[in-house]
Image: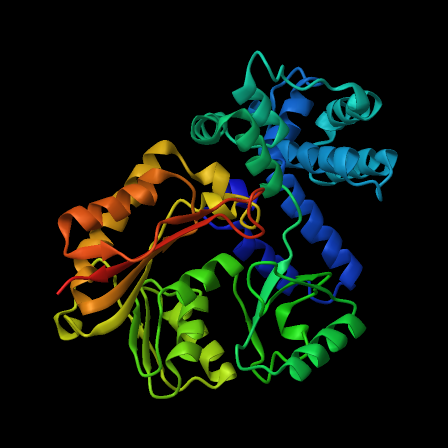
Amino acid sequence: MALEREEIYSGVLLSGVLTKYDYLEQGEKAFIKRLFEGTTEQRIYLDYCIDRFSKTPVRKMKPLIRSLIRMSAYQILFMDSVPDAAAVNEAVKICRKRSFGSLSGFVNAVLRNLSREKAQIPLPDKKKDPAFFLSVRYSVPLWMAEYFLKLYGPEGAESLLAALLEVHPVSVRLRSDASPERIQRFLEDAAAAGVRMTQSPIYDHIYLAEHLEGVASLPGYEEGLFTVQDASSALSVTAAGIRPGDLVVDACAAPGGKSLLACELTGPDGHVISRDRSDDKCEKILENAARLGFRQLEAQVFDATESDPALKGKADVLILDVPCSGLGILGKKRDIKYRITPESMEEVALLQERIVDASWEMVRPGGILLYSTCTIGPRENETQVRRILEKYPFEAVTEGRQFLPGTDPCDGFFYQVLRRKG
């Protein structure tokens, strides 16, 4: 209910709840997490199924009843560990407890009908209306299904959307100076702690962690052996060609993974300026830098849409990992798809242009600009790079690289490396 009512991201909301009820057993907290995230992720599909058995459409239900039926429907359709009867009975009890006893019969009837018929619920016709099929089957807004169909066709769009619904392990990047023996010991300690680690096929020092209670619980965390970073993000920083002693400016740095890898590449004689508009995010970046022992990182609260004459022509490498629609990480941030609209995508593209316009002069002649996003689609990616090349004195060093879930073993991500002429 809070997620629908408030402008707050699901991850922040869930973290607050789990902290508040930290006294619960780990299994109970895992249940809360699974039910909340699953119901959020599958909301459109759940509403489609519920509407087949309810005379009142989900969108017209009272907020508590709507949330209650959705959560119960998720348990019935997706959680084999919960008997259907238990999910129904618990919903009825909560309904009465929350002073909606007059609607308990309605809740009971809808959920029992759903339970009886769940194996026979037909999906929309895939051939007659592919966009509606994808919207329901993969629980994304209809406009988004149409958008992916236009970009990648029926097979490509379905592959992408299916991958976004898969379980996403935590991506852990070990320090590049970690010895093979230290890495082996880390993997053995993680296995002993019940964490399954799988090496990334596209970045040797990255491992995907499953069955992980929290990153801080992994052996090696306190000593600064690793940080959290997706392979696509790490590959983009590596492609920028950062050298020992370089001055690197990360203009939109939070959560800081690129800044931390830049510190490894510059070495102790380099200087990494890591910027964000938020005091809290800059503090978090500094905490991680201290944990990894990087004294060359300087965190600054700074608005990237503002120019900085003091750094004009100074940066060897400028990292512009600009704000974006986030379509490449829908599988990790499950509520993004309900917040994005075509109009907001255009607004964020204009914000990206403002950041580029304010920031490009920080690159010294011959220096590098790394442009990247965690989204999918030309307006925020290739079109923006083309604008930079047409408007400012840069040349392409690499081709633009678009990672796609379902095609690549990583997040959806785009990057291109440019060099300032002169």
Q: As rendered, which of 274 and 281 lies closer to the eye?
A: 274
Q: Is residue 140 above or below residue 395?
A: above
Q: Residue 274: horizontal and vertical position, in percent? A: 34, 72
Task: Identify the image quadrant of the C terminus.
Answer: bottom left
Q: Is residue 384 above or below residue 272?
A: above
Q: Residue 305: horizontal and vertical position, in percent? A: 22, 57
Q: Is residue 312 left or right of residue 160?
A: left
Which of the 4 image quarters holds residue 270? bottom left
Which of the 4 image quarters holds residue 163? top right
Q: As rendered, which of 98 and 293 lies closer to the eye?
A: 293
Q: Can residue 96 be seen here?
A: no
The residue depicted at 52 percent of the width and 43 percent of the height is: 335
Q: Is residue 277 left or right of residue 293?
A: left
The residue depicted at 49 percent of the width and 37 percent of the height is: 338
Q: Can residue 43 be seen here?
A: yes
The residue depicted at 43 percent of the width and 42 percent of the height is: 376
Residue lying furthest top: 128
Q: Is residue 9 above or below residue 237?
A: above
Q: Is residue 8 left or right of residue 197?
A: left
Report the coloring of the rendering. Answer: rainbow
Task: Identify the image quadrant of the N terminus.
Answer: top right
Q: Residue 354: horizontal and vertical position, in percent? A: 21, 51
